[in-house]
Amino acid sequence: KNQVEQSPQSLIILEGKNCTLQCNYTVSPFSNLRWYKQDTGRGPVSLTIMTFSENTKSNGRYTATLDADTKQSSLHITASQLSDSASYICVGLQSGGGADGLTFGKGTHLIIQP
Amino acid sequence: DTGVSQDPRHKITKRGQNVTFRCDPISEHNRLYWYRQTLGQGPEFLTYFQNEAQLEKSRLLSDRFSAERPKGSFSTLEIQRTEQGDSAMYLCASSLSNPAPQYFGPGTRLTVL
């Protein structure tokens, strides 16, 4: 069964600090891994998409890494801002799995404090 | 605004009533998805259309739920005889063919009293 596990469940950091969110996935056959940002009461917004051949991808202050051997991904946020407060959801896509081939993690709830 | 839109944004209804939600995807996207999300959980897949064809339905989609995409553009999700357990955020997303990213709408928050 495909699974995506995220840690920590929640995280509180001070504005300006860096943080790293973790994602362990079991998705087979693997196509790509996605990170989404979801503000409270809003739909998720795509941050990055990585295939198995990509080790790292950046989107502004967000940098995602992927280790296809250990099936782990991380999302690093640099110089956090208050607007980074949100849930960050890791999603694995199964190759050839159709729409049901997307496996969502439960998300990491990040709070940035001033 | 050329993003995915959903209507209404909030719906409060009494148990047993029927509700219908609408999703307008990004115009050139041929794929449209419906998800349900409860507090503290990731989105759960409900159903998916490619153009006007409903290609997949989750086991979560009981016979009280029905979705349509009659002209391959907007879609509706109807819940009949609502139950308190149906209270959730209902998200719509659209995309081009995989592995293109999905673009999510703002969601419709349903509260069943």
Image (cartoon, coloured by chain):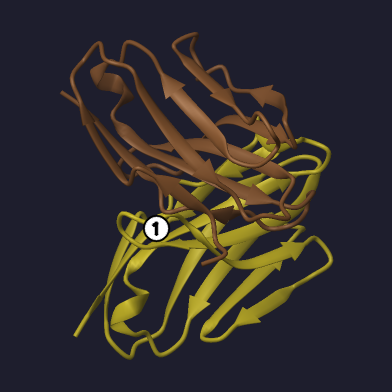
Chain colours: A yellow, B brown
Where A97 falls versus B93 (above or below)?
above
Q: Position of residue B48 (x, y in %)?
A: 65, 33
Rate crowding at label 1 as few (under 14), some (14 to 19) or many (20 or more) other CA atoms within 10 Å.
Answer: many
Where B25 falls versus B1 (above or below)?
above
Q: Look at mark 1 in the image and give the residue it sits on.
A: A108
Using the image as rendered, state which of residue A66 and residue A60 is in the foreground: A60
Image point (37%, 85%), residue name? A80
Tell me: A107 left or right of B73: left
Q: Position of residue B45 (x, y in %)?
A: 55, 33
Using the image as rendered, state which of residue B41 and residue A6 is in the foreground: B41
Q: Position of residue B90 (x, y in %)?
A: 41, 38
Q: Quadrant of residue B68?
A: top right
Q: Chain of mark 1?
A: A
Q: Quadrant of residue B110?
A: top left
Give the residue furthest to the left. B113
Give the residue furthest to the front. B71
> Is residue B43 visible from the viewing direction of this image?
no
Image point (50%, 8%), residue name? B63
- Quarter the C terminus of chain B occupies: top left
Where A110 falls versus B4 (above or below)?
below
